[in-house]
Image (cartoon, helix red, strand yellow):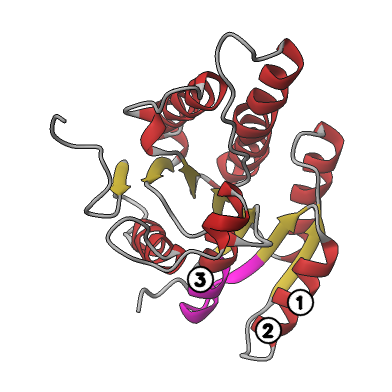
Amino acid sequence: MQDLARHTAVITGASSGIGAAVARKFADGGAKLVLAARRRDRLEALAEELTAKGAQVLIRPTDVTNEADVAGLFAAAEEFSPITLLVANAGIVSHSPTLEITTEHWNEVIGVNLTAAFLCCREAFRLMAQRRRGRIINIGSLSAQMPRANTIAYTASKYGIEGLTRSLALDGREFGITASIMHPGSTVSELGGEAMSRATPSEKMVDAQYAAELIALMAAVPDEANLLTATMLPIAQPYLGRS
């Protein structure tokens, strides 16, 4: 088990999937948690579960695409406990043929997956820079390395997250801030729809808990080190090799 007791972590998209799994793993490691998502009922249920095990948890219903909401999230988090860690996990999946995708849908996907991550990272960066300490972990995707067909908006957003992370890692050097990215492959989660949320972990679909364990490892390394990038995928996912 990773020792995360030094961290106060803001986790976005915490109401389900990888975000909820990260919250549980971080609670096991002793971190204080600030859980953000749009669904208050899900956050309340998760907080009740974790506090029953002794975790210190603050929930904050948040629309991460709303700049004022994001500012409020980080103000509340800082009042709860000075934050040392952000896991920017909120996102949506999009499968839209390039010939059919609308500008409205493109903007929605980029807004949720990339602009919202920027807003959260910027607020975290500002607070961390004052203390010259902090860690940001963004959740990417295999699509940031190899796209699927008919996912132009999603792929562009995840390539953007890769660039965002590398720029943060560079700009954070002088402030003692690290930034890294974890690229999950196919993962059991509501993000991919009802069928994926009910899937059984297998060689073609990993459990969200496995992703959370890797993210916890990235969070637990000493402040002066950074695990810049990590990729986790089911061994049967058609990513490596040629057909």
Percent coordinates x, y for residue 19 in the rendering: 58, 59
Residue denoted by label 1: 45
Residue denoted by label 3: 26
Mark 1 and mark 3 residues within 8 Å of each other at the beta carbon: no
Count of labels shown? 3
Rate crowding at label 3 as few (under 14), some (14 to 19) or many (20 or more) other CA atoms within 10 Å: many
- The C terminus appears in which quarter of the rendering? top left
Determine the CA span between mark 3 and mark 2. Answer: 13 Å
Name the amino acid type tagged 2. Glu
Residue denoted by label 2: 49
Name the amino acid type tagged 3. Phe
Mark 1 and mark 2 residues within 8 Å of each other at the beta carbon: yes
Percent coordinates x, y for residue 94 in the rendering: 59, 32
Determine the CA span between mark 1 and mark 2. Answer: 6 Å
Closer to the chain start, of discs 1 and 3, is 3
Judge whether residue 227 can be spotted in this image.
no
Q: As displayed, is residue 173 above or below residue 227? A: above
- Which image quarter: residue 228? top left
Closer to the chain start, of discs 3 and 2, is 3
- Which image quarter: residue 69? top right
Q: Secondary structure at mark 2?
A: helix
Say left or right for 91 vs 209: right
- The N terminus appears in which quarter of the rendering? bottom left
Judge whether residue 17 can be spotted in this image.
yes
Percent coordinates x, y for residue 2 in the rendering: 36, 74
Residue drawn at x 76%, y 34% as measured from the top left: 65
Residue drawn at x 28%, y 46% as measured from the top left: 237
Q: Find the magenta span and give its range.
A: 23-33
Which sits in the foreground, 148 or 69?
Answer: 148
